[in-house]
Image (tube, rainbow, N blue to C red):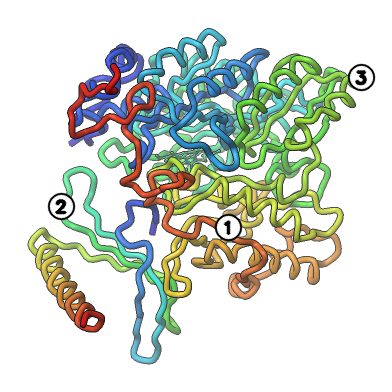
Amino acid sequence: MATDVEEWKAEVYGTDIREHVERFAEEGWASIPDEERDAWFERFKWYGLYHQRAGQESYFMMRIGTPGGVLEPGQLRVVGEVAKEYATGPVSNPEFGDAWADFTTRQSIQLHWIKVEDIVDVWDELESAGLSTVQACGDSWRNIVSCPVAGKDANEHVDALATVHEFQREFKENDRYRNMPRKWKVAVTGCREGCGQGDINDLAFEPASKDGVDGYNVRVGGGLARNEPRLARDIDVFVPHERAAAVADGMSALFEEYGNREDRYSARIKFLVDEWGAEKVRRVLEEEFVDFELQSAGEGFRESYSYNAGRDGDGHDDHVGVHSQADGTNYVGLNVLVGRMGVDDVLELADLADEYGSGEVRLTQRQNVVVTDVPDEDLDDLLAADLLDDYEPDPSPFMRGSIACTGTEFCSLSIVETKNRMVRYARHLRDTVSLPDEVEDFHVHLSGCTASCAQPQIADVSLRGMKTRKDGEPVEAFDLGLGGGLGENPRFADWVGERIPADEVPGAIANLVETYEREREGAETFRDFVERHDESDLEDLVEPEETSYEDPMMHNTKRTWYPYAEDDDMAASPAPTDGDGVPLDAATGDDSAPADD
Amino acid sequence: MKVNAYTTLDLVDCRVRTADDEAAGLGVANATSARENPEHVRLRFEADGQPEGVAAHVDELELDPEQARALAADLESHAAKVEAARSGEHGD
Ligand code: HEM
Ligand code: SF4
């Protein structure tokens, strides 16, 4: 028998959802019947809307998908304007103010505190700029990720952006794949550095050549979730650039046909690949889902992959800094700590991109932004702009390497505070811990639960939310992993430190760095250093310790209605509220109105 | 085990014993049933630390509804007993 979610999807799904959202927007939050909320919120995900967690009822997170992370000239400004007008909650965030935009690990944008009453207005503004929230969440083709500088990079092998645009047209702006068994994450890489991160996606196109033809090798079945991470498996297929869509189509159809709809838990292609093996995936793809003979894999570039790799070498680990484009101009990568940018800064960035570049801005999978098309003669002026004091092109490794997911601030699955904590960690580490001079990259990825949205398993230091007891009291804590990274030989971290109280994590990292500095051999990177040790040695290297770092969020933030509210008690929540943010008093019924109305 | 805000106990004191050794520490416990057509209640437990010679593992009970209720009832009654004893200690 099909699951609830499958039944809800069978009733109303895809673009049919829109007219209902329009009705709810018109009639207000209270018009969504209580007993239908679960079903509607599940369907809303297809349109990029997630209902926020308990204590924040009637507020939504909205995800805007930007294919390949590309924001065309003018689009970032609209994002900033929409965020400023609509993405404000009842209480501000102490680090980021009243409104902000989140740039995510899948090159998307997330806004919070959106009211159902405003959704249609927000869509109108976004759509007028060519932006879309369609299929940003839910069981569908998710935002297609790629090298953020595809089509610009001086050393690119194939133009991944052309492929991304083709996929976008064929599979997202099209009802064919509007209803998959589960989410479907696709990555297209065209460069020699591996910055599409295909290894952790359901379907990966990797740059390759065969018999003088440029195109992609195909890998299938990667992903980080459920505490069962998998690397995408090589299915020994090369496809020419212009035929990539036929293979993407075939793999999507294969997943649609054989993906397990009975059990959402196992309905990811990674488990199908486990079960079948790569050879059978290839055979079934060829026999049933494409109408040409598949070629065996071509010559790829994996040995030069440097992105998020933690190895020594020429390629870059991220896109921060000034780099040359093929057309003689430059792109400038700016570090956005934990991917969150206050709205005024977003608008200022849009101005700078207009003034010194083409107006285009791109988002990376490391939660950073890239201003493209900056001519040599404008570089110094851009680099001298005040905004770059906060979003640096040349930051401390700890600032640059930090990634954090949403956490207890908005996410119902989280057991710890994440983004603001990672901001505090990064600043503390920058100010108190020194790395060897030539080390530019030190990645710390922090996730609030095992869903792994911050990609913790592929960092130098992996942090995953937990609980522990300290001085008798339950406190927020982290499991700590070491040894993860992508590159030619990707590996997931081993979880070698358990339940470290959140206020002792910076001390644990400082001690790790100190040991590394003392014991490294030559120019060994941290990842190489870690790989030289076995698991029990690594356990001994993890020495949690209190330091001058103080953590104001040690208590159980998942039980607050909002961790940063002065009165954070669940009972003090103003939610649900009406379209103007006025609490709807459940006791007086749905049609209650402010007294002066 | 996956651990998130829906996990029943993300923090529980526990002890794992073998004939020769014992590890005391913290663990995770979760009571669930399959999302669709559940056939039994699943009670899972995983300890952080293990005694000598025991590999990291998860223990799982498959309880039919009657067994789950029997367990819940016993837990309730012992919880009441412990609470009563505690209030006796402190209240005077
Ligand atoms: C209400 C629940 C959830 C929320 C609010 C949420 C939020 C997010 C966010 C914010 C990101 C981007 C991370 C960033 O850059 O900030 C993300 C990506 C991701 N999400 Fe979730 N998430 C939720 C549930 C889940 C669940 C249940 C899973 C696993 C089944 C999951 C797996 C992932 C993974 C693996 C990524 C990142 C890696 C990738 O893109 O492959 N998330 N999610
Ligand atoms: S990793 Fe967990 S806590 Fe963080 S956003 Fe994803 S689901 Fe939420």
Label placed on residue A377: 3
Marks 3,2: beta carbons within 8 A: no
In whole angstroms, how far apart are the C-alphas of marks 3 and 2? 69 Å
Pointer 3 and pointer 2 on the same chain: no
Q: Above or below — where is A577 with respect to A358?
A: below
Can you tell me whether the CB of the residue at mark 2 lies under 8 Å from the nearest atom of ligand 1? no
In whole angstroms, how far apart are the C-alphas of marks 2 and 1? 35 Å
Q: Which residue is mark 1?
A: A493
Q: Which residue is mark 2?
A: B39
A390 vs B9, nearest the viewer? A390
Residue flagged by tag 3: what amino acid is it? Glu
Residue flagged by tag 2: what amino acid is it? Glu
Residue A228, percent from left and from top:
45, 52
Marks 1,3: beta carbons within 8 A: no
- Seen at 55% across and 22% down, the residue is A84
Provide the secondary structure element on which disc 1 rests: loop
In whole angstroms, how far apart are the C-alphas of marks 1 and 3? 43 Å
A314 vs B91, nearest the viewer? B91
